[in-house]
């Protein structure tokens, strides 16, 4: 399979999303990706379904799911974070296509920006590295095809 990857990104916080995509794209490009397609969704809750649509095409070695959820004053944060994580995990387990959870779950916009290529961690890059690692593991463990 050609080195083709997908990035599914929640655009609710545009500045954070742009940073996450740029860093994930950089990792995929550094690894020699032939093509990187980016698919936008409104928020983190929509990431699992978009990842499923992308995985079901069979075109991609892996998918980096990116976005941010910032805690507010209600329980909405908990539901969105939990269901995004569960849904992304379900997609990779059901399809066998690596789907990295690159969704920031933070207390403030400052924390989100720090973790989207800022001074602490770069979750976009980490998600892309996770996809590459799992895709390579799958390739290593794949049964060798015998030629007749």
Image (cartoon, grey):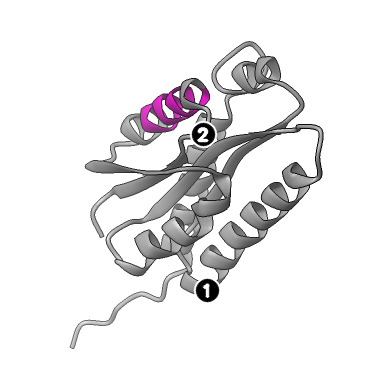
- Tag 2's secondary structure? loop
Query: Residue 106: x and y, percent?
Result: 73, 30
Which residue is situated farthest in the front direction here?
Answer: 74
Left or right: residue 128 versus residue 40 is right
Could you tell me which residue is drawn at 67 percent across and 57 percent down? Answer: 83
- Tag 1's secondary structure? helix
Res 130 quadrant in image:
top right
Q: Is residue 147 above or below residue 66?
A: below
Choose between 43 and 100: the one closer to the eye.
43
Could you tell me which residue is drawn at 54 percent across and 48 percent down? Answer: 100
Choose between 19 and 139: the one closer to the eye.
19
Q: Nearer the viewer, mark 1 or mark 2?
A: 2
Per the rendered image, the range of residues in magenta is 16-26
Which residue is situated farthest in the left direction here?
Answer: 148
Query: Residue 35: x and y, percent?
Result: 23, 43
Query: Residue 19: x and y, percent?
Result: 46, 22
Mark 1 vs mark 2: which is more N-terminal?
2
Choose between 105 and 146: the one closer to the eye.
105
Our reading of the magenta stretch's main secondary structure is helix
Left or right: residue 3 versus residue 90 is left
Could you tell me which residue is drawn at 58 percent across and 24 percent down? Answer: 122
The residue labelled by disc 2 is 12
Left or right: residue 128 versus residue 77 is left
Quadrant into which the N terminus falls: bottom left
Query: Residue 115: x and y, percent?
Result: 63, 22
For marks 1 and 2, give the CA distance: 27 Å
Q: Is residue 25 magenta?
A: yes
Q: Is residue 148 magenta?
A: no
Q: Please give the label number shown on residue 33.
A: none
The residue labelled by disc 1 is 94
């Amino acid at each position: 399979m050609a080195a083709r990857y997908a990035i599914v990104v929640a655009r609710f916080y545009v500045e954070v999303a742009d940073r996450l995509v740029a860093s994930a794209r950089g990792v995929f490009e550094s690894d020699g990706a032939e093509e990187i397609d980016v698919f936008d969704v409104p928020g983190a809750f929509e990431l699992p379904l978009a990842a499923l649509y992308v995985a079901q095409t069979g075109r991609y070695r892996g998918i980096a799911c990116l976005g941010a959820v910032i805690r507010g004053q209600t329980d909405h944060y908990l539901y969105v974070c939990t269901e995004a994580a569960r849904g992304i995990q379900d997609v990779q387990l059901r399809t066998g296509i690596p789907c990295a959870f690159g969704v920031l779950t933070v207390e403030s916009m400052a924390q989100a920006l720090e973790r989207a290529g800022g001074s602490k961690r770069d979750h976009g890059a980490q998600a892309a590295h996770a996809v590459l690692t799992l895709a390579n593991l799958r390739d290593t463990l794949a049964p060798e095809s015998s030629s007749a």
